[in-house]
Amino acid sequence: MAARSCRQKAIDPSLILFLTVSVPKVPHVHGPGLLDYVRQVLNTTLSPISTIQKSPSLRKQKPRDSHKMKLHLALGFLLAVLFNQNLLTVHVEAGDDFVRTRGVHFFLNGNPYFANGFNAYWLMYVASDPSQRPKVSTAFREAAAHGLTVARTWAFSDGGYRPLQYAPGSYNEQMFKGLDFVIAEARKYRIKLILSLANNYESFGGKKQYVNWARSQGQYLTSDDDFFRNPVVKGYYKNHVKTVLNRYNSFTGMHYKDDPTIMAWELMNEPRCTSDPSGRTIQAWIMEMASHVKSIDRNHLLEAGLEGFYGQSTPQKKRLNPSLDIGTDFIANNQIPGIDFATVHSYPDQCRLSSSSEQYQLSFLNNWLDAHIRDARIILRKPMLLAEFGKSWKDPGFNTYQRDQLFNIVYNKIYWSAKTGGPASGGLFWQLLARGMESFRDGYEIILSERSSTANVIAQQSHKLDQIRKIFTRRRNVQRWKRARAKRRGGWHGLWKRVYSLSDEWFVPPGDYGLGSVIGPSIPQTTLQALLGHACFATSSDRNMVSTIRAHNLRKLCTVPNIAFIGNKDILVSQTTSINSFRKQHVPNAINMLELNSLLKNLVKTGDLHEARQMFDEMPQRDEISWTIIISGYVRAMKSSEALLLFSKMWVSPGLSMDPFCLSIALKACALEFNLNYGELLHGYLVKSGFINSVFAGSALLDMYAKFGKIELGIKVFDEMPIKSVVSWTAIITGLVHGGYYKKGLVYLSEMRKSGVEYDSYTLAIVLKACACLGALNFGREIHTHTVKRGFNDTSYVANSLSTMYNKCGKLDYGLRLFEKMNTRDVVSWTSIITTYVQMREDVNAIEAFTRMQEAGVSPNEFTFAAVIASCSGLVRISWGEQLHAHVLRIGLADTLSVANSLMTMYSKCGQISSAAMVFHGMSRRDTISWSTIIAVYSQGGYGEEAFEHLSWMRKEGPKPTQFAFASVLSVCGNMAILEQGRQLHAHVLSIGLEQEEMIQSALVNMYSKCGCINDAEKVFNEAENYNIVTWTAMINGYADHGYIHETINLFKMLSKVGLKPDSVTFIGLLTACSHAGLADLGFHYFNLMSSEYQIRPSKEHYGCMIDLLCRAGRLTEAEEMIKSMPFHRDDVVWSTLLRACRVQGNVDCGERAAEKLLEMDPNCAGTHITLANIYSAKGKWREAADVRKMMRTKGVMKEPGWSWIKVKDRVSAFVAGERSYPEGEEIYGMLDLLASRVDISVQELGSLLDLED
């Protein structure tokens, strides 16, 4: 031990021998235990030492000299013990083979450590099969031969095939033995391991499996991101961590937590929480789990598994991200206590960049690495590891040179950082395989035995990093030798003379001072003082607290121990027994409250709330500023309950007074916590104390009431405020707009401008939202002018609000132009433009915009996917919709309300009713839109019974039915002509006050019209209090269906008189009326009027009406030409219309062409075959008709029989054409024969007349 201390500190061995003559074997203890041991040893060994030293001259010394001698001996003994315990070597623990960190570097056994390594997620999985373990050994052997020193692999496999964890707490011993073998082999080849403890993705279970386990236990979880929030799920994860860390290795005979083969633990592979882009969820989870891991294992390093995405703590750097808003934050997450080093992942070929060129990808990689290396050095001050990178040979145009070029860029960045003392300490390529592992190939694999050029690049990097390590080691040894030589030349006798002189300065006669006397502050810092300070520093039982104090610039507080005598024993001891007690004794004397509050504020600003709370709790004195800082930190982190708890403690703390700013923060916490009672109590205190007149408190109070929906109280608070700032005005306008009081919000804006208060960008953004909801285009344009004048139009949220305003006001082209002019386009901008295209029915452009968004590196959110899925509905592209469905399932967004609702609509429009129902029944939670959507799906799909069932289900178990749900079921009543049920629904909507809703009115008019009650439809129409185009169009369609051509045209002409403008649906009704009346020329007049006067581009439905009009008029040639010239995909509807017309007109040639087109689309369509056969039969072409029927039999095509529903005494009975297996079938057909006999026709003839025999 003496020799080891000599090597470390270059101390004269003779001095160590002198110091350790009487020192017995000291157990390895730290902190207070060591000092107690010192006292014990001094009591037992002082007499023998005194006996050895006694001489007549010494016996004659004065008492003061005797005390000096004992002091000298005590000092020498303390130094000897400290050297013996190796406690003076405080920075790097040498010789234990664990990788440590100091500053921005890794160290191993006191030497710099650089990690050139690889990823091999498959190691445990393959090693679990003993017959496959040679592949693991081969991989490690080849890696070691190429100088690789670190491997990253999975220490998880949850559920599924060959899992490590069958279920929470239930483990597969065979898989664990595979991991045991991996660790043992890595140890054999001197390769360190980074073991990841969970997966963000579904591979090997991932967070989805944890969530499913919790769901099976009755937990209500809405998405896979609940992995980071749900206490049950977090409990499962913590148990897995504890199990793995405490695992006893069956090969090495060591627990994992004690095995230095493991370099670090990784909390999760690439954690993401897309449901919370703010990053708070991930931040809280990492903080909690880092603390949990460190409570079990303080030997190993820990990292979070991050990819390097910048977040809310550095918004200006989010532009560097290849995609946005995945819920992580490179800076804030890596600043969490317990996270020892940062990680970055980079796959430029997978990043959604604005260009896919090779040069652009490499440029992105350069900037990505430079930014993170700089931030790790300046902000984080921690080592950084590029934990994943690679290049796939599956990329178009791939060649090995491209991969080597990428590896060289990465390796050069790491090399130069390491050479200049930077934080980039290594890189791990993805992934290493051995020969014979074809099933594990993913395009990124490297097989070192293939001796590729990439393998040479890897080996060269290993050699270069090893050379740097050797250079640093030699340099450090030279510095140690120089220091030791300087000490030897100066002589330790000189040092001890200084020690003796210091003891004279410190000496106090016994009894002059009591226990706990402090003499240190007036003494200048000397070598011995610093030495003792470091010794006391090293005896702390909490090593993490030591690093914390360093981080807080409190190191000076720990350099002067509190020296005192213990009266009756005359022994010098240090009262500083731990860092915590040391802080409590010395912080008030060394740093004033201003400096402490400044440190606390910096911690809160950086998001390090856990460390800030720890410092706050240890502060011996706290003023109002201290409390306000920590409470505001919790509010900013959305931890409102903790903030209110702290505020309550502050309230009852003696000597503290409240101020308006602190009260405003507490009111914000009440709003976040939805705690109205607490807020009202604070309101009362504000009134009583007079703080209600404060701008801070008043603004926060009205904002709280607005968020609670108490807008009247908010207005009252605002009106009573003597001074109103821009914050106050913005708060009241925001409350009004969010509460639906759009016009009043605009009124308050006008009053704000009259009062002379200048608005800011936030005010204009919320006002633009009011304009959008009101459709107030002129006012919105005026606000647009102000944004340009004030320079706010380049602000992203203002630009997005402007675009949304123009879109909602019908000026979609303006919204598009604004989007194109935006300097920066975030996910809100892209989502807005995609939604605009969908509203314009330019679905192809919507898809293209979505593709451009991904190329620009912007990550879509749930609303983006909802919009682009809606575009697939418009295109009726089921394949595209299914691909998007699969994608949102993979990234965990399929269960979000907006995406699920859009998927249901898409599937219904594509005719996949069962798929829509599957989405609905698979939703973990449903809102009114979900219920209304599925009811509309069944209604539009012709499933009336299911629509009624779901409406009843919604009324019993779901939210209160909305007008959309009732309108859908009323549509069912109209389509099925069930008047009585329609009247019942009409009565119900009257009872709940929905009869004046636009959608209900139009549905009632439509229902009564289709049930033949045109007079009732007119009555509903005439009772409408407000004119709207939807109800007006429903009435026009009702007249058209009943053949009331004059009423239809007259109603259309009245539109302009009541201030309404017809839409595309209105013209469908008008053209239908012309078609039924056979007015072809008038139909063409209105068809042309659409585009010439109303700027409505004819849709496929309008062309269908015109084709039907021409067919009814017998102008089949013109109809066929219009079909061929229409600018849309010619579907089966228009050709079927022409085919039916050919049957009526007896046009065989045109009918054959129409039938040919239809059979190309659907070769097994029974209707097409039957209609064509009937055309042939009508013209006497019996052979051709027989051929068609023979073709039907060959194909197995059968006409689906017709169904009928008859209601008798509240019982509905269904009948199928040609079916006689009913209980009363014989009686029914007997009655039908009787009725037919009276008109001199048989049932068979009747069926022939109606073409039912087919």
Image (cartoon, rainbow, N blue to C red):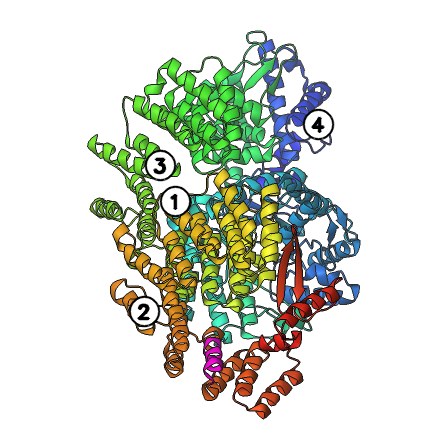
The image shows residue 1201 at horizontal and vertical percentages of 64, 71
- Identify the element where label 3 is drawn: loop
Residue 1023 is tagged as 1
- Identify the element where label 1 is drawn: loop
The image shows residue 538 at horizontal and vertical percentages of 59, 32
CA–CA distance in space, label 3 to label 2 = 41 Å
What residue is shown at x 62% (from left), y 38% (from top)?
A: 13
In the rendered view, does 781 fall on the left or right side of 762? left
Please name whichever residue, 876 or 450, is drawn nearer the observer in this view of the structure.
876
Mark 4 and mark 1 in contact? Answer it, CB < 8 Å: no
Q: Is residue 1145 magenta?
A: yes
Asked if residue 1079 can be seen in this view, the reply is yes
Classify 10 Å Cα crowding around label 3: few (below 14), some (14-19), many (20 and above).
some
Identity of the amino acid at label 4? Ser
CA–CA distance in space, label 4 to label 3 = 87 Å
CA–CA distance in space, label 1 to label 3 = 27 Å
Q: Which residue is mark 2?
A: 1087
In the rendered view, does 169 fall on the left or right side of 1145? right
Closer to us: mark 3 or mark 2? 2
CA–CA distance in space, label 4 to label 1 = 109 Å
Q: Which residue is mark 3?
A: 741
Q: Which residue is mark 4?
A: 22
Identity of the amino acid at label 3? Tyr
Classify 10 Å Cα crowding around label 4: few (below 14), some (14-19), many (20 and above).
some
Q: Earlier in the sequence, mark 4 or mark 1?
A: 4
- Identify the element where label 2 is drawn: helix
Q: Which residues lie in the magenta part?
A: 1136-1146
CA–CA distance in space, label 2 to label 1 = 31 Å
Mark 3 and mark 2 in contact? Answer it, CB < 8 Å: no
- Identify the element where label 4 is drawn: loop
Closer to us: mark 4 or mark 1? 1
In the rendered view, does 1203 fall on the left or right side of 618? right
